[in-house]
Amino acid sequence: MARVGFILLALLASGCVTIDLPGGKPGPLVETVLEGDGPAKVLLLEIDGVIAESPERSRFGFDERESLVARVRAELEKARRDQDVRAVVLRIASPGGTATASEIVYREIRRFKEARSVPVVAELMGVATSGAYYVAMAADAVLAHPTTVTGSIGVIFSGVNVSGLLGKLGIEDQTFTAGEYKDSGSPLREMRPEERRQIQAILDDLHQRFREVVAEGRPQLGAERVAALSDGRLYSAEQALASGLIDGITDLPGAIDEAKRRAGVAEARVVSFHRNRDWRENLYTQPPAAQAPLLELPGLFGGLRSPGFLYLWWPGL
């Protein structure tokens, strides 16, 4: 053990090791060329994992990584200042996330497009559902991998009622409130009909917003067709293409080729912007997982550590 400590100290003294201390400021974004040549760049921007505004925590809670929302904003700001970035490919592998975080990422991509007027192509990977599809609506073209599952255009507010179980255990709710509906959705009692109507009204408003975003992103469908497709069901890549929810089926290199075609460049370097500790090697390298596993307590959902309205597909939530 003493020998290991001596080696670590020696490496630190030589400057060979960088340690990110908990709570420390993240390092600056660096650029890695993943493939290709030429002066033009295609930025590969990752939308991976649950889309949330809160920082992602390591498995044991000792470290944090900036939230997906913050990272996307930072990468797009760097791309906005880099005139060599001629196109962006969104590699989307996410079940969705909170309604607000999905909306923010969507708006950040739209904001970048207004500032730079460069093509943005979304490539949907294995699972790209709900809020992830919402984000894809900011792109100029939406493509899917042959094995992609997408759709789930809807909203969910999850909750349970354990009052019956507590009664069997002899446990009584003693919650005090000032305001008739202050504890709406409490798991400690049965929800009243008026409370159900209130929460359902919020879900309906958010669902309408989702449909409006899809209608704007897929104008060829029309509002009526969008409404019919937005019942929360899942679609395979082939089904999504037949329904008009995506523009084509291809792999990630095919999406990059489409971005270059739209940018009018024959050759380009595919680049990734990332923090120093998040290494990149090729198109499929992803940052190390920071979120707690779904079933690990505390915090069932990693980045989702508070109640909310979700554009999320997660069976059993």
Image (cartoon, rainbow, N blue to C red):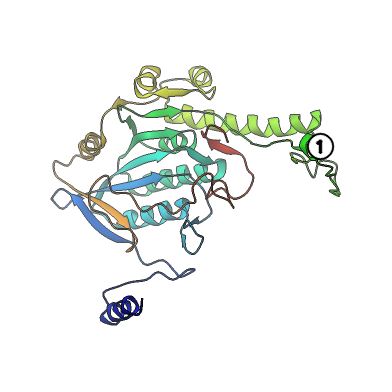
* Residue ID at (55%, 29%): 154
* Residue ID at (25%, 33%): 251
Residue 255 appears at what percent x and percent y? Answer: 26, 35
Of residues 81 and 285, the one drawn nearer to the viewer in this rendering: 285
Q: Is residue 67 above or below residue 195?
A: below
User: In which quadrant will I find the N terminus?
Assistant: bottom left
* Residue ID at (50%, 42%): 102
* Residue ID at (35%, 80%): 2
Residue 220 appears at what percent x and percent y? Answer: 40, 21
- On the image, which quarter does residue 307 sit in? top right
Q: Residue furthest front?
A: 1
User: In which quadrant will I find the C terminus?
Assistant: top right
Residue 159 appears at what percent x and percent y? Answer: 67, 37
**SS for dot 1:** helix
Of residues 23 and 138, the one drawn nearer to the viewer in this rendering: 23
Residue type, label 1: Lys
Check disc 1 and report the residue beneath it. 168
Residue 262 appears at what percent x and percent y? Answer: 24, 36
Dot 1, crowdedness within 10 Å: few (<14), some or many (≥20)? Answer: few
Q: How many marks?
A: 1
**Is residue 30 left or right of 153 when viewed as pictured?**
left
